[in-house]
Image (cartoon, rainbow, N blue to C red):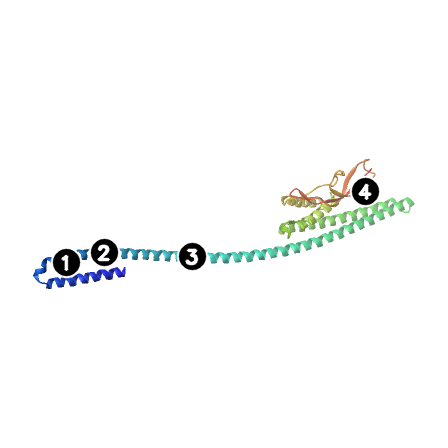
Amino acid sequence: MTNIMKRILSSILFLLVCCSIINAAPASNDQTLNKSVENLKSNQVRYENQLRQVQASLDETKRQVNGLKNQNASLTHELDSVKARCSQLETTQTADKNELTGRIADTDKTVSSNQTALKNRTTWGIIITVLLLAFLATLAAIAHSMRKRIKSGSSSIDEVRKAQDALQTAQTKMQEESVKLDNKLIELAEKQISAAPQQVTGSGEVDHSLAMKVADEIVRIELNMSRMDPSIKGYKQLGKAVQRIKDNFKANGYDIIDMLGQPYNEGMKVIASLVTDESLKPGQQIITGITKPQINYNGKMIQTAQITVSQNL
């Protein structure tokens, strides 16, 4: 556009020079000069029109350039805003990731600690059970000795009754202590189940180890309760606690199959130990003991029951 303007200005100067020459020329060439002047004027008008068009085009170009500058400034501002948001999002994601990693680590530590505590509690439960069995065996030996003494006439009826009362009192005391310990064990198990979410193994499957250990303890407690007098102190409270934790199990997809006292048949998917009991009806088979219960998770068996079957065949 600058070259066109230079050409137009040069033409205008040329016309001015020609006009000066014409004014200085002789009168005899008036007609020729008039034609030249007319042509020059016509060219001048045409060039002036072209100059105005070029100026208008130049103004429009400037306006477009200013509009593009404004758009560029707006886009730059939006880009800076997006960059700031991305930076803020990255910072937030990093903080969330670090927090989540910390929570997972804390949960792993809690689960590990709870599992260790439950193992220790289970060990103590086994020891207590063994002690109770040993105590009951001692009571049975004493009772047997007392029966022998009665037969030999070396003891009076009053002495026998006193001994029986003492044995009954000691047995009741032991059962009350057992109920207390089992109540504490149930309380600990409930806290662990509520505090520790389901863990996933490396293969992506749910880790059922904690649930299985708690279920084993529940069945042991139920078996002990079946041999106790319901009037024992704490018996009803223990029964409610057992039912509560079983309901909690169901809410989390676990189902402990109740087999104690149920008839046995060879088609059951269990590991059975058979013992003879002549007090049963001929041909009768009853499940009288459960070492490990059958556990289903979302309808699928994850632990096979280990049971004791009393029979009279």
Amino acid type of disc 1? Answer: Ser
Q: Separation of disc 4 and disc 1 at Cα?
A: 141 Å
For label 3, the residue is 81
Q: Position of residue 307 (x, y in %)?
A: 76, 44
Q: Residue furthest left?
A: 27
Amino acid type of disc 3? Answer: Ser
Amino acid type of disc 2? Answer: Gln
Amino acid type of disc 4? Answer: Val
Residue closest to the eye, 107 or 227: 107
Name the image quarter holding residue 97.
bottom right
For label 4, the residue is 275
For image coordinates 75% across by 51% down, the residue present is 126
For label 1, the residue is 36
Residue closest to the eye, 174 or 191: 191
Residue 144 relative to residue 45: left or right: right
Q: Which secondary structure, mark 2?
A: helix
Q: Mark 1 or mark 2, which is nearer the start of the sequence?
A: 1
Q: Position of residue 43 (x, y in %)?
A: 18, 57
Q: Separation of disc 4 and disc 3 at Cα?
A: 81 Å
Q: Mark 3 or mark 2, which is nearer the start of the sequence?
A: 2
Crowding around mark 3 (Cα neighbors within 10 Å: few <14, some 14 to 19, many 20+) is: few
Crowding around mark 2 (Cα neighbors within 10 Å: few <14, some 14 to 19, many 20+) is: some
Crowding around mark 1 (Cα neighbors within 10 Å: few <14, some 14 to 19, many 20+) is: some
Q: Separation of disc 2 and disc 3 at Cα?
A: 46 Å
Q: Which secondary structure, mark 3?
A: helix
Q: Mark 1 or mark 4, which is nearer the start of the sequence?
A: 1
Residue closest to the eye, 73 or 93: 73
Q: Which secondary structure, mark 1?
A: helix
Q: Which mark is residue 50?
A: 2
